[in-house]
Amino acid sequence: MRRSPLPSSAVHTWRPPLLPGVEVTRVENDARLWSGHSTRYAISVTYSGAFDFWYRKRVWTQGPGRLKLKEPGEVHRDVRIHAPVTAQTIAFEAPLVEEAARLLGLHGTPHFNDALTRGSGRTEATALRLHAALAARTAHRLEGESLLAEALEAVLVEYAGGTPEPDSRERHPPAVRRAREYLHALSTENVGLESLADAVGLNRFRLLRLFRAEFGLPPHEYLTHLRVARARVLLAEGVPAGRVAVDVGLYDQSQLNRHFKRIVGLTPGQYARARQ
């Protein structure tokens, strides 16, 4: 019996324009053995396949379900491929991670105490959301910066000893309410997490935690709900979906379709027809 040819391998690298200091590399159906000296921090996810790699004087096995963590100044090399790998790596310039660590109460250079995550849930979930958004290449500024901050916080707290300040006793409802007002006033603009945090006098990690605690959603999700609510009004008025996406501040019509269906339960077209 003739075997079907294996899919060809591919490597893609890009720098998200709205996230300085971040680079994404994706390999698909790859069976090469890679090696190198890390100059940046990195979080890698394997979607399919498995491989063994040498790092920190021992061999590890990486497959789906756990994240691979790297930091500057260390050598890593692959030693065996069990099955062709599809994976994605997000590399972070050291100053970006060092600043995040400082804001999370770490002193000195951040150090990951494990090469692979333990699969405990939160770190993997937040990192996978960031990976998915960067792979789609459609995230707006607030979404990208928020997902980046959430992923860095999760990794640094669980694997580098970061200690976010407890928020149960000390809340800042006036500050987060101002942040909400800011989002309402600028819902069609490409608002950034850093500018939002500066406007209300909080660092970005605290703003994310407090905003979620106060309103049940992180700022970028709240902004998406605002935009979808406005889209409903425009669609009911007969505005074409392609124009609605731009008018409410979304990237394009496909992004409108995705968010609208997730929140409303109908596509924009179905909703518009139902309102006729």
Image: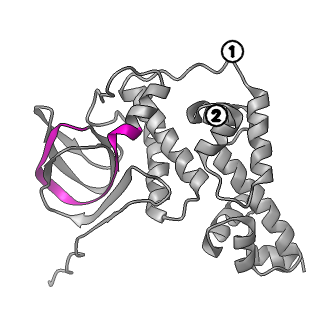
Q: Amino acid at mark 1?
A: Arg
Residue 253 in percent (x, y) is at 65, 75
Most common secondary structure along the magenta stretch: strand
Can you identify the residue that label 2 sits on?
207
Residue 191 in percent (x, y) is at 65, 53
Residue 207 in percent (x, y) is at 64, 34
The mark that comes first in sequence, 1 or 2, is: 1
State left or right for residue 50 relative to residue 196.
left
Vertical relation: 223 (above or below) 262:
above
Q: Looking at the image, is mark 1 or mark 2 nearer the viewer?
A: 2
State left or right for residue 260 relative to residue 147.
right
Note whether residue 267 is visible. Answer: no
Residue 169's disc number: 1
Local SS, label 1: loop
State left or right for residue 262 relative to residue 71.
right
Q: Residue at x 61, y 68 (%)?
A: 251
Q: CA distance from mark 1 to mark 2?
A: 15 Å
Q: Residue at x 74, y 49 (%)?
A: 183
Q: Residue furthest bottom?
A: 2
Decide which of 170, 51 is in the foreground and name it: 170
* Quadrant in which the C terminus appears: bottom right
Local SS, label 2: helix
Q: Quadrant of residue 209?
A: top right
Q: Is residue 74 magenta?
A: yes
Residue 172 in percent (x, y) is at 73, 25
Q: Which residues are magenta?
A: 72-96
Q: Is residue 86 magenta?
A: yes
Vertical relation: 82 (above or below) 236:
above
* Quadrant in which the N terminus appears: bottom left
State left or right for residue 133 relative to residue 55.
right
Q: Residue at x 28, y 26 (%)?
A: 113
Q: Quadrant of residue 254?
A: bottom right
